[in-house]
Amino acid sequence: MLTLNLLPTTNVPLSKSRPKYPLSPSPFHPNLGSRNQKLRTLSFTKPLIQNGHPFRCSANQDSHISRPRLDFSKILRHPSGVSSRNTTQILEAASGSPEEVSPDGEIEVSKPKVNMKLALIFGLWYFHNIVFNIFNKKVLNIFPYPWLLASFQLFCGSVWMLILWSFKLQPCPKINKSFIIALLGPALFHTIGHISACVSFSKVAVSFTHVIKSAEPVFTVVFSSFLGDTYPLTVWLSILPIVFGCSLAAVTEVSFNLGGLSGAMISNVGFVLRNIFSKRSLQNFKEVNGLNMYGWITILSFIYLFPVAVFVEGSQWVAGYHKALGTIGNPNTFYLWVLISGIFYHLYNQSSYQALDDISPLTFSVGNTMKRVVVIIASVLAFRNPVRPLNALGSAIAIFGTFLYSQATVKKPKKEAVEKKD
């Protein structure tokens, strides 16, 4: 020890470790153990003789106390050099924002940020849907011409997408003749589904239409089975409460109308066939994202619907317009209602596509089920529709069946993916 004290000090600076987060006081903490080991190595290294002068330690890189840094070894395992998770999460972690490390070593965004993002996604989705349903019904109450209103809503969506593409707020897809031909079928069924729903809204309460539209999984299973798809027993069992609940709600509905019921049922058929044919005919156009796909379907649907709307009820529009103005009194209020119904029809569809991009299919299906509950409650409160106890029970059973169906259909591929990964 005396010899060591007489030795000249080294010129090699020893950098202080300034960890971003405080080290654990436990002596078994790996970072703390590593630092102590390096300190012991530096304190008891034998003197070395270079050029006739003894040195306490050699000036190499190992004599420095290294700063604690993020371990990217887990990330470098991936063939591409980065994790499949969003690279912005890695940048946020490296820049000093709070992060969490998963058992696999991947950096994840903190839970408060994730919860805030989910709340924003669902909040906008539900809000757009509620506004559309309320103002759509307000217009139909004084202007009962659903063909014109549905055409205007598709027109608003078409203009909205053209604006996004023109100002490059949304990347414009490169389309060709084969893409348009592949979209003709899904756009036709989308048109049928939309106009049928509007006809139903014009004849019955909004809550009743949404209860019947919650039976869409039944049509999905039936039509897909006819086309060769198979479903496990749990899926078939999940649609039984949907059928029972919708039947009970229809029998006890105060505002029951056969036209409203058939409109909601046809709407289910239209949207189910749209989904089925979209999967079959658009497999070769995966470079087009969901929102752009929906934009082109909206444009084609407007081209489909408007000429038919003129033929079906065009002769009644002028008289109905003057009657609506006489009922509401202020023309600007009527125009505002129509405009809101058109804009928010597109916004709620756009927000649903954005929600599907940002959350898992399971979360989306559960959110879609809860969306119907929120819309039904909001419409009952807004229009003060009378609800019988059995009608409320039937609605609850139908919606619960929809929830069971979403669980049964989403869990199966999730299990297969886990097995494949193992």
Image (cartoon, rainbow, N blue to C red):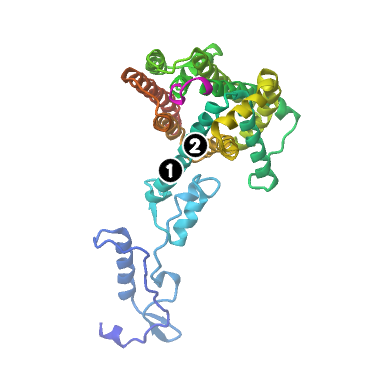
Spatial CA span between label 2 and label 1: 20 Å
On whether residue 205 falls in the magenta region, the answer is: yes
- Quarter of the image with the N terminus is bottom left
For the stretch drawn in magenta, the main secondary structure is helix
Is 148 on the left or on the right of 420, as rendered?
A: right
- Depth order, front residue of 287/83: 287
Is 215 on the left or on the right of 195, as rendered?
A: left
The residue lying at 39 percent from left, 76 percent from top is 14
On whether residue 159 falls in the magenta region, the answer is: no
The residue at which mark 1 appears reads as 118
Q: Is residue 313 above or below residue 116?
A: above
Mark 2 neighbour class, 10 Å CA radius: few under 14, some 14 to 19, many 20 or more: some
Q: Is residue 73 visible?
A: yes
Amino acid carrying mark 2 in the image: Val
Amino acid carrying mark 1 in the image: Leu
Q: Where residue 239 sits in the image (x, y, percent)?
A: 41, 17
Q: What element carries label 2?
A: helix
The residue lying at 58 percent from left, 25 percent from top is 194
Q: Is residue 117 above or below residue 341?
A: below
Sequence-first tag of 2 and 1: 1
The residue lying at 47 percent from left, 61 percent from top is 95
The residue at which mark 2 appears reads as 131
- Quarter of the image with the C terminus is top left
Comparing labels 2 and 1, the label whose residue is closer to the camera: 2
Q: Where residue 236 sits in the image (x, y, percent)?
A: 41, 15
The segment highlighted magenta reads: 202-208
Q: In which quarter of the image is residue 301?
A: top right
Q: Is residue 280 visible?
A: no
Q: In which quarter of the image is residue 321?
A: top right
Is 77 on the left or on the right of 396, as rendered?
A: right
Q: In this view, does 2 lie above or below 136?
A: below
